[in-house]
Image: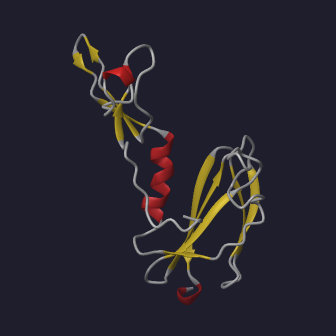
Amino acid sequence: INHWAQGWIDWNVLLDREGGPTHPGPKECEGVVKCGDDAMMIADTAFREAGPAGRFVPQVFYFYMGHFSRFVPAGASRVALRNPLDKSGNGGDAKGKADGSLEAIATLSADGERVSVVVMNRNDAPIAFTLEDAATGRAAALTVNAHAIHTYQYPAAASA
């Protein structure tokens, strides 16, 4: 979203424990290596003596995407965010590995009343930072734990 994406499509919202169903033919899926990928939700389709397990197991990505779908409302606009804790400008080093950076995005609701700031720490240690809103003059000292995502919401300057 920070790099001008306007939407997101996740092809694999729900898969089974082996990453299926898949579209490749039998030559691509034979042997020890199974076809498929990870998904936001895994269906436990294994059969037990009592019948199918039939449970759904949410994965980490499910909860990460939840921050955007719950806290960034439809029609929201990305707003300027100066992030001195994002050393490379993309939340990691040139190969996408965590480098102590803190990824963040700020949005303003379509009605202009609510600011949402989503921050993500891909690192092995917590990151302390100060969230400051230049328009309102409000500031808060915050910490994001290792491998965590947090969302902060507050009234925009016009409705404060």
In the foreground, 56 or 42: 42
Q: Most extreme residue toward the front, as rendered?
A: 27
| Percent coordinates x, y for residue 39 in the rendering | 42, 39
Residue 94 relative to residue 30: left or right: right
**Is residue 119 shown above or below 16?**
below
Q: Quadrant of the N terminus?
A: bottom right
Residue 35, quarter of the rendered image: top left
Q: How many marks?
A: 0
Identify the residue shown where x is 78% and y is 58%. Answer: 87
Residue 85 relative to residue 14: left or right: right
Residue 79, quarter of the rendered image: bottom right
| Percent coordinates x, y for residue 105 in the rendering | 60, 66
**Is residue 22 shown above or below 67?**
above
| Percent coordinates x, y for residue 160 in the rendering | 57, 85
Identify the residue shown where x is 71% and y is 61%. Answer: 89
| Percent coordinates x, y for residue 127 in the rendering | 75, 52
In the foreground, 156 or 39: 39
In the foreground, 144 or 110: 110
In the foreground, 36 or 127: 36
Q: Most extreme residue toward the left, as rendered?
A: 51
